[in-house]
């Protein structure tokens, strides 16, 4: 028959159980604290990341508004520039032969250049049949002019034709095919007068 446990043994065993449970509770509590701490750290990092993202979103919204405003401003400038280029292009490379406007431009050059001491007089303009390039990329209107000019104005006329096609000067695109010249001494001035006949091709679009 087994011996009965003494009171002292029962108490010691209970103390050991209590000690074991206490250690177990401390370990478990430590694990809970550690878990909670790491979760709090993660939460803090997430909260900071969310705050940073929200700040970035606000920055991006602000940039979007600024970029949209800049785009609209630049679009207005670009549209105005496009209109100016289109308008200039109609002058220098028109859709039609526009021989009337071409004649007017020669008259304007004559009026601006001709003077008593330095003449520039167009005595005749003869338009010829319209021609087309071999690749049919564009057409041109041949014309022949007879002009009496001083040497200075003769040079200005060549420069006028040379800068043709410029969108800045808005001079009809032209080139000189041939020039025939003769010189005569003008008794009323000290300069020579050049009488010349020039054949010019004035270009326009093939539409």
Image (cartoon, rainbow, N blue to C red):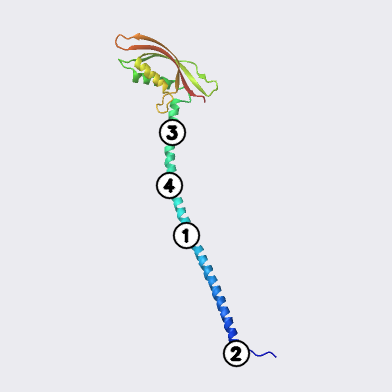
Badge 4 is on which residue? 66
Residue at (37, 16) in percent of width and height: 154
Secondary structure of the residue carrying numbered label 4: helix
Q: From the viewer's perspective, is the residue at label 2 or at label 1 nearer?
A: 2
Residue 77 picture quarter: top left
- Can residue 63 be seen here? The reply is yes
Q: From the viewer's perspective, is the residue at label 1 or at label 4 nearer?
A: 1
Give the answer, above or below, for where 15 lies relative to 52: below
Taking depth in this image into account, of 86 and 198 the one nearest to the observer is 198
Q: CA distance from mark 1 to mark 3?
A: 51 Å
Q: Outermost residue toward the right? A: 1
Badge 1 vs badge 4, beta-carbon distance below 8 Å: no
Badge 2 is on which residue? 7
Badge 1 is on which residue? 48
Category of crowding for the residue at label 3, using alpha-carbon neighbours closer than 10 angstroms: few (below 14), some (14–19), many (at least 20):
few
Query: Which of marks 3 and 1 precedes in the sequence?
Result: 1
Q: CA distance from mark 4 to mark 2?
A: 87 Å
Query: Which of marks 4 and 1 precedes in the sequence?
Result: 1
Image coords of residue 60 (percent x, y)? 46, 50
Q: CA distance from mark 2 to mark 1?
A: 60 Å
Q: CA distance from mark 1 to mark 4?
A: 27 Å
- Can residue 104 be seen here? The reply is no
Category of crowding for the residue at label 4, using alpha-carbon neighbours closer than 10 angstroms: few (below 14), some (14–19), many (at least 20):
few
Screen quadrant of the N terminus: bottom right
Image coords of residue 80 (percent x, y)? 42, 35
Category of crowding for the residue at label 1, using alpha-carbon neighbours closer than 10 angstroms: few (below 14), some (14–19), many (at least 20):
few
Query: Which of marks 2 and 4 precedes in the sequence?
Result: 2
Taking depth in this image into account, of 137 and 53 the one nearest to the observer is 53
Q: CA distance from mark 2 to mark 3?
A: 110 Å
Query: Which of marks 3 and 2 precedes in the sequence?
Result: 2
Q: From the viewer's perspective, is the residue at label 4 or at label 3 nearer?
A: 4
């Amino acid at each position: 028959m087994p011996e009965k446990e003494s009171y002292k043994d029962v108490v010691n065993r209970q103390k050991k159980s209590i000690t074991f449970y206490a250690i177990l509770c401390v370990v478990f509590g430590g694990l809970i604290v550690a878990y909670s701490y790491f979760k709090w750290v993660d939460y803090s990092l997430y909260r900071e990341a969310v705050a940073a993202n929200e700040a970035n979103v606000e920055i991006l919204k602000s940039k979007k508004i600024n970029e949209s405003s800049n785009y609209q401003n630049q679009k207005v400038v670009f549209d105005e520039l496009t209109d100016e280029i289109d308008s200039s292009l109609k002058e220098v490379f028109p859709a039609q032969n526009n021989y009337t406007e071409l004649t007017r431009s020669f008259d304007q050059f004559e009026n601006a250049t001709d003077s008593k001491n330095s003449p520039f007089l167009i005595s005749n303009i003869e338009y010829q049949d319209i021609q087309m390039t071999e690749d049919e990329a564009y057409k041109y209107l041949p014309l022949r002019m007879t002009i009496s000019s001083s040497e200075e104005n003769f040079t200005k006329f060549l420069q006028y034709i040379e800068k043709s096609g410029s969108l800045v000067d808005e001079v009809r695109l032209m080139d000189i095919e041939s020039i025939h010249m003769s010189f005569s001494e003008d008794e009323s001035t000290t300069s020579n007068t050049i009488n010349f006949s020039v054949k010019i091709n004035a270009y326009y679009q093939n539409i």
